[in-house]
Amino acid sequence: MSYVRYYKNIKMGADEKLHQRVFDEFNQLVANKNVSILVLASGYGAFEQRLIDNGFLNIQSIDIEDTYKADNKNLIIKDLNKNFEDLKGSFDYIFAMEIIEHLENQFHFVRNVEKLMNSSTVLFITTPNINRKSLRLRFLLNNEIEFFTKKDLHSSGHINIIQDDVFKHNLELSKLTVSRETHNRNYFSKSDFKSNGIRFKVFFVLYKLISSFIPGSDKVEKIYIIKKNI
């Protein structure tokens, strides 16, 4: 059974604490409440509602279908696998959370996003961290990359593994660069235990026994904060 998360009764299509973590990073950068914001793959609009509740109202949202529940609906229906660079104007802040791994072509996506950025635009992209310790251990045990298994192709739509070096090369080709890189929460949390059974708990014990021998961290998502090269 999956663990469904909500913000003010609006379903979040993201992992635990990710929206809050990204908002906190954004809130440290923003100069005023009138900035123009684009949210790509907005889903039910939970992140937009968080922005609205904090006084940000100049928001444009894009999704492939209309399931939007936030207060100020400004939604354009578009398939992000296709061109979307024709949106009017540029934006001060662009959010693409937990979408790039669902898309057919990460290079096409970044090229289109770059066209919507001005010289000072800040772009937030998040994606599952495939380098985390527990994922490496799972791969060792069953030869599957967690969140990108055959089952995930149909249940979560994860079809595109975002490897750090390839992604940064992608950005470089579009004259973009990572100005800051951070992460969301650690993998093992109360919600993980709530939504998984005995096999997960056995895996946790095994992880605790050998994790000190595995390099890296165990953060679930990577958060990239991106700007244009100047």
Image (cartoon, grey):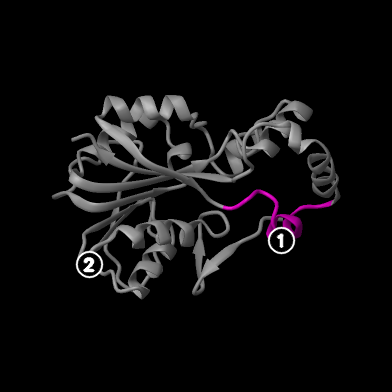
Going by the numbered disc 2, the residue's amino acid type is Asn
- State the SS at label 2: loop
In screen coordinates, is 230 left or right of 50?
left
Q: Magenta stretch: residue 85 in it?
A: no
Q: Magenta stretch: residue 190 in it?
A: yes
Residue on which the image places disc 1: 190
**Which residue is at 43% across, 36% downward?**
103
* Residue 105 seen by the camera: no
Where residue 146 appears, as percent x and y from the top left, is: 65, 37
* Residue 184 seen by the camera: yes
The one nearer the camera, 65 or 182, is 182
Q: Residue furthest front?
A: 212
**Which residue is at 49% across, 42% downward?**
127
> Based on the displayed image, in which of its 4 quarters is residue 80 positioned?
top left
Q: Magenta span covers which residues? A: 185-197
Screen quadrant of the C terminus: top left
Alpha carbons under labels 1 and 2: distance apart: 36 Å
Residue on which the image places disc 2: 32
Where residue 4 appears, as percent x and y from the top left, is: 61, 61
Sequence-wise, the earlier of marks 1 and 2 is 2
Q: Residue furthest left?
A: 89
Going by the numbered disc 1, the residue's amino acid type is Lys
> Based on the displayed image, in which of its 4 quarters is residue 107 positioned?
top left
The one nearer the camera, 39 or 152, is 39
**Which residue is at 73% across, 34% downward?**
138
**Which residue is at 40% across, 68% downward?**
50
- State the SS at label 1: helix
